Amino acid sequence: MSLLLPRISISLVFFLTLLLSSGQLFASDDLKRVVERKNVEKVAAVVEAINVQNRIVTLRSLTRDASVVMEVGDEVRNLDQVKVGDRVVVEFLEAMAVDLKKGGGMTPSAGAGGAAARAKLGEKPAAVLGGALQVVAMIIAIDADEPSVTLRGPEGNVIEVLVQHPEKLAEVDVGDQVIITYKRAVAVAVTPSPIE
């Protein structure tokens, strides 16, 4: 088995730890986490077609009847080493958190960031890419019958959001703020597949 998969898996774990750590863009001791969701999925696939010149790769899942065509950016090194029939492992992560700041006091704002890591020259192609978006919004209305909250975002935009757990509405008041954080990452490594 290639040593690349453990290295990429370690990179993904480290990368995701950085992305998912509680070190928010807007850190504060008086925040309360009210929603947290995370989904990690690992997919084994085979390279079905590759156009190195145009940097287009077609992957077919080994466990589902699904294929995906991907444009591979210049940041992916060693693409010329990838051949039709190569096995790859792709890991996807999506996470969302909502923190509550009682009484407000923060300036409505939005921030984004990202990070990437890639294989060294000469190694089998591999990459880890991810990003995060964080928004501070004000609760301007609460509808317990719906159940929903209406938020005003950093640019004055207003949106009504349905609440999955109506019992949590008892914890919020008009004038409170929410910090919504969305994070996404993907890791791809050419490696012997655990699935034939």
Image: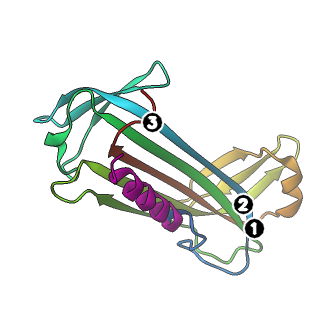
**Circle 1 sits on which residue?**
175
Q: Give how far across and how far down residue 18 sits, in percent.
A: 49, 68
Mark 2 or mark 1, which has the lower sequence index?
2
* Callout 2 amino acid: Ile
* Callout 1 amino acid: Gly
Tag 2 near tag 1, CB within 8 Å? yes
Image height of 72 relative to 38, above or below? above
* Callout 3 amino acid: Pro
Which sits in the foreground, 133 or 49? 49
Element type at mark 3: loop
Whole-number angstrom distance, CA of label 2 to CA of label 1: 5 Å
Residue 33: in sight, yes or no?
A: yes
Q: Is residue 191 left or right of 15 when viewed as pictured?
A: left
Q: Which residues are magenta?
A: 1-18
Q: Quadrant of residue 80?
A: top left
Tag 2 near tag 3, CB within 8 Å? no
Whole-number angstrom distance, CA of label 3 to CA of label 1: 52 Å
Residue 178 within the magenta-colored segment of the rendering: no
Dot in front, 3 or 1 = 3
Mark 2 or mark 3, which has the lower sequence index?
2
Residue 17 within the magenta-colored segment of the rendering: yes
Q: Give how far across and how far down residue 129 sits, in percent.
A: 37, 54
Image height of 195 relative to 21, above or below? above
Q: Is residue 115 left or right of 173 when viewed as pictured?
A: left
**Circle 2 sits on which residue?**
139
Whole-number angstrom distance, CA of label 2 to CA of label 3: 48 Å
Dot in front, 2 or 3 = 3
Which sits in the foreground, 88 or 67? 88
Q: Give how far across and how far down residue 157 sits, in percent.
A: 56, 53
Which sits in the foreground, 154 or 31? 31
Q: Residue at x 44, y 60 (%)?
A: 10
**Circle 3 sits on which residue?**
194
